[in-house]
Amino acid sequence: MIKVEHLTKYYGDFLAVDDLSFEIEKGHVYGFLGPNGAGKTTTMNIITGCLSATSGRVQVGDFDIFEDACQAKRLIGYLPEQPPST
């Protein structure tokens, strides 16, 4: 289960994700569709713990991605187009 609540991300004054909320139940598959610049990649990077949010909450399984990132990341398989460097 993935639960996103009121997710917002600003890059300076630019609003990339605006108060996004949704829930994905276990066993379901979804896709993000939208034009370039719509915030799809930013949202995925926040959900997977690769990027911080300006505000909002993301829960993966029983874990908050911002408070229990290691536990939440164990439940995620994600290969971004440009993997983050460590």
Image (cartoon, rainbow, N blue to C red):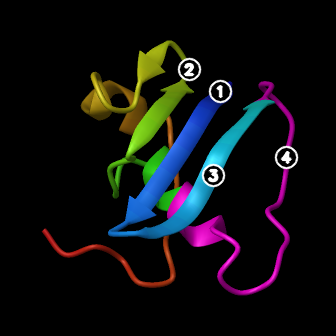
- Residues at marks 4 and 1, CA–CA distance in whole angstroms: 14 Å
Q: Which stretch did the figure color magenta? A: 24-43
Give the number of the disc on residue 29: 4
Badge 4 marks a residue whose secondary structure is: loop
Q: In the rendered image, which residue does mark 2 sit on?
A: 61
- Circle nearer the viewer, 2 or 1: 1
Residue 7 appears in the picture as rendered: yes
Q: What x and y, as percent, mark residue 30?
A: 85, 51
Q: Amino acid at mark 4?
A: Val
Residue 43 falls in which quadrant of the image? Answer: bottom right
Q: In the rendered image, which residue does mark 1 sit on?
A: 3
User: Are there few (<14), some (14-19), or many (20+) residues within 10 Å of tag 2?
Assistant: some
User: Are there few (<14), some (14-19), or many (20+) residues within 10 Å of tag 1?
Assistant: some
- Which sits earlier in the primary sequence, circle 4 or circle 3? 3
Q: Do the residues under discs 2 and 1 have CB atoms within 8 angstroms? A: no
Left or right, residue 52 beside residue 44: left
Q: Main secondary structure of the magenta part?
A: loop
- Which sits earlier in the primary sequence, circle 3 or circle 1? 1
- Residues at marks 4 and 3, CA–CA distance in whole angstroms: 23 Å
Q: Amino acid at mark 2?
A: Gly
Residue 19 falls in which quadrant of the image? Answer: top right
Q: Nearer the viewer, residue 13 or 49?
A: 13
